Image (cartoon, helix red, strand yellow):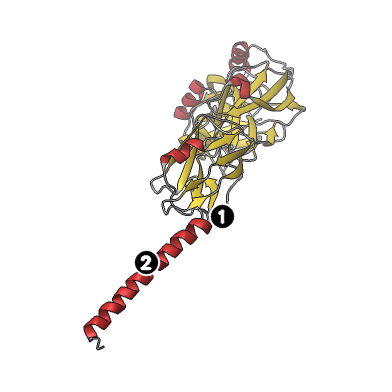
Amino acid sequence: MKISKKHDIQDILELCRKAVFALGLIAFFAGSAVYGAHFYLSEYGEKISAKKTSDIGLKDDVAVNFSVPVMGKEYLKDVKVFPEEKISVNFDRSNRNVVITPIGFWKPESEYMVMLPAGKTTMLTNFPSQKISFKTQGYPRISKISPSNSSKDVIIDTEEPITVDFDKSTKGFFVKFDLSPQSELAYENNAAKTQFRLLPKGAVLDGTHYELKISIKPDSSGDENYRQIYTGYFDTLPAAPVAWEKDFTLRLEQAKRFTKPKISQGKYIDVNLAEQIMTLFEDGKILDAYMVSSGKRGMETPKGEHQIYNKAPRAYSREYGLYMPNWMAITASGAVGIHELPEWPNGYKEGAAHLGIPVSHGCIRLGVGPAKRAFDWADIGTKVIVY
């Protein structure tokens, strides 16, 4: 029997189609038996190539990543987490990620078990149930605190506030500071929330035993979730005895009456370190006197004859992270100057209670009104005598 060329080609094509179909059936049934979804758990949205099962954030979504899409939203109803938490469970658009969202927060330093039911992929292949565990991030811990526990002769001030450093960011947590006997505190933190600076809003009492307690809890959770992570104390410097009137108003009147000019011509600024008083003189006559706060022990304001080297309405100290309004440098290096009570970047100003007490890092501080008066009055080159 003769077979035409046309029939040969048709027969070959038909055989190919049958072979492809047969191979497809074999692959389908074989796949149903042996092919399943491979999956791992990660912090959702993070680009990773390996499992991440620890340090999950307290409010982070957790995703179970499947190697192939999963069939049916009914599958989500049987996804469980133990210990039980209120959660929502959803697929992402690809149906390859089961996204588990805490309604509230995961408990810190806890291990959870995700129970995944058996199911089917969109290729109609079966996969078995499985358990995957993950651990949540731990509580931030204090790495450094100043003043340190049991410190003596402490001076708390804008230049030396209470500082608390954590070993990692406190984002996702709320930190509570309790200082006794002073309860109300002003505080600020850095952008990373790893360091806090604290100051009592009222006057820091001399010669007083203070106790500091620090507690932390997951943000937005109830007070019952607070965990105390620090307790300590420090004692402030006792008030030094003074020969002049303790009442600053009376002491300033004494200064105006008894301070003698050391320069008889032109302007000059007189600074009496022993009595913590600044007096403005012009042509041998007293214009006014103000209480100041000069350098503390070990960082004393340099004595001698100086002058105003430069002025700035609002200088900034990178070393201490503070603004110093009405700045007037009295050393050529610019390291020491006269300025208003320093301010934190958030505008909080403290230190008025320390006028009359040497607590600064070498500069001469003035109150708000007196600092502006002195700044407007003094010129570049005005003499400053410190003794």
Q: Residue 50 carries which label?
A: 1
Q: Which of 140 and 358 is in front in this view?
A: 140
* Label 1 or label 2, whichever comes before in sequence order: 2
Can you say whether 178 is above or below 83 in the image? above
Could you say where residue 1 lies in the image, as x and y percent from the top left?
26, 88
Disc 1 versus disc 2: nearer the observer: 2
Q: In which quarter of the image is residue 159?
A: top right
Q: Which mark is residue 21?
A: 2
Q: In which quarter of the image is residue 183?
A: top right
Q: Residue 79 carries which label?
A: none
> What whole-number distance in Å separates the C-alpha atoms at marks 1 and 2?
37 Å
Mark 2 crowd level (few <14, some 14–19, many ≥20, 10 Å Cα)? few
Residue sitting at x 74%, y 26%: 232
Could you say where residue 241 lies in the image, as x and y percent from the top left?
74, 17
Name the amino acid type tagged 2: Phe
Q: Nearer the viewer, residue 49 or 88?
A: 88
